[in-house]
Amino acid sequence: MLAIVSDVHLTDESTARNVDEGAFRYLSDAIVTAAQREIQELHLVLLGDIFDLVRTDYWHEEKIKLADRPWGGVLDPATGMNSDTAEVERQFNAIFERILATPGSRALMQMLRHLPEQLGRPVRITYIVGNHDRVFNNFTSLHERMRRELPGIEITFANALHAPEYGVSARHGHEWDDVCHGWRFARKTQHDSTMGLFDPEAYKVMAIGEPITAELMSGLIHHVRQQIDCVSSAEDRDFFMNLQELNNLRPIFHVFHWLAWLARDRYRKYGEIMLRSVRMSLDSLLRSTLAAKWDRIQADFLLWGDTVYQLGLLRSLVKTHISVESLSWLVSTGVNIKSAFGIFLPKSDDDDLVRGARKEFDQRIKDKRIQYVVYGHTHEARHDCFSAAVDGVVRMYINTGTYLPLIERSRDGQGYVSSNQMTMAFFYHDQEDTNQRAGDGPTLALWNGIRRKRHV
């Protein structure tokens, strides 16, 4: 059995709240139940962004100078990161240790360690690297640290999985997101026009989405915390816990509308604090070496949307003393913030990952046994059938969503609603799940669901 999950985004919880550890009890129960269909093994695919090594205020807490951060100093053209490789590796290992110490990470590791005994079958793991855990492609010390957590379980790290016996081709999906994949940036900085989208070298290059997450999104939360009292003030603590949900907003370019919504009523007193924090976070991001280089190299508006230029324009808007409500209005009328974050509208036929999956079927996948292209990344669970034959053979795109909450704007535009999500995909080859088969090919069980309560 091939089981796929993605986008758990376990952090050190300094600027975000991890999924409740109860979610992993549900996942364990689901895997054990799915494995009752005469399986021969469990091949678990962690399809990227399982750990989030950039959603943190580590660099602020440790008072690491901007020039010493991964996107500062002199950049290495091969990685787009600070050329002081040993120091960058030390920083990411320290962040990974903080993540592994959280209750959510401990619950995940405990679940994985117990699976072989529960199933009575071999378990192997393929960890597909995404964009928030991209540095797994740079530092094998992170691999070894994870292996120490899971002794006796075979773990392979990769950028994609081709499993024709299960009819599956899978990757994280950020390859189709220019803000989150450094391919085009690498081609220009390395002057290598032959580098392909899926070349191993492309996966080692930092994209602007990483410092956007660390400096702008996490930085905003860090700066707010520095201005309020989360220890003795219940009101401040309640506000901060709500603010930590910021990264779960979809589409993420609604962030300023969401902040304005928070400030409009219940948290009105925090409006100026939020606006001041936006200014400080934008300043930090725009002063980074990577942002400056990205702005110089990626100046084609039609191709790139000029992400850093737009963020600089946004910074000029908040330079004057305006309210967070005014900022929301300015963004909605004057700045195309959507392309600045490279996030897609939910369940839209214009989704770049849907188009990418179709390209994979049409241009890359030659093996006729592949029926399913599986991505994560967008946090929007979906499945789209491109074609179907009389014998039941399909060409289908599946997105494995996320385990994080999803915050969406209500249809009346006046508020936001949050729901916990969980998506699981199970594939069986022709020697498994033999009862009442419709044909000889692989079978699929795909489960998407939400809970408007915690996973307890």
Image (cartoon, rainbow, N blue to C red):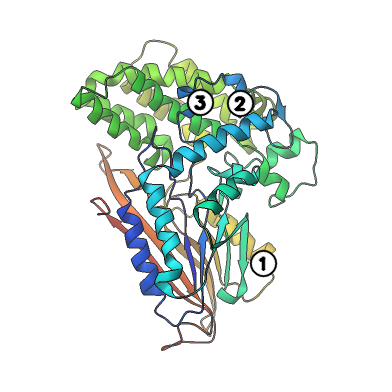
In the picture, measured across the screen, residue 387 lies left or right of residue 452, that is right
Looking at the image, is mark 2 or mark 1 nearer the viewer?
2
Q: Amino acid at mark 2?
A: Ala
Quarter of the rendering occupied by the C terminus: bottom left
Disc 2/disc 3 C-alpha distance (Å)? 17 Å
- In the figure, 14 relative to 368: above or below? above
Is mark 2 in CB contact (under 8 Å) with mark 3? no
Judging from the image, what secondary structure is the residue with disc 3 in?
Answer: helix
Q: Amino acid at mark 1?
A: Ile
Disc 2/disc 1 C-alpha distance (Å)? 35 Å
Indicate the position of residue 8 as horizontal and vertical percent values.
43, 50
Looking at the image, is mark 3 or mark 1 nearer the viewer?
3
Indicate the position of residue 21 as horizontal and vertical percent values.
33, 51
Q: Which residue is mark 2?
A: 291
Judging from the image, what secondary structure is the residue with disc 1 in?
Answer: loop
Nearest to the observer: residue 142 or residue 8: 142
Is mark 2 in CB contact (under 8 Å) with mark 1? no
Q: Which residue is mark 3?
A: 59
Pointer 3 or 1: first along the chain: 3
Q: Which residue is mark 1?
A: 365
Pointer 2 or 1: first along the chain: 2
Q: Amino acid at mark 3?
A: Trp
Disc 3/disc 1 C-alpha distance (Å)? 42 Å
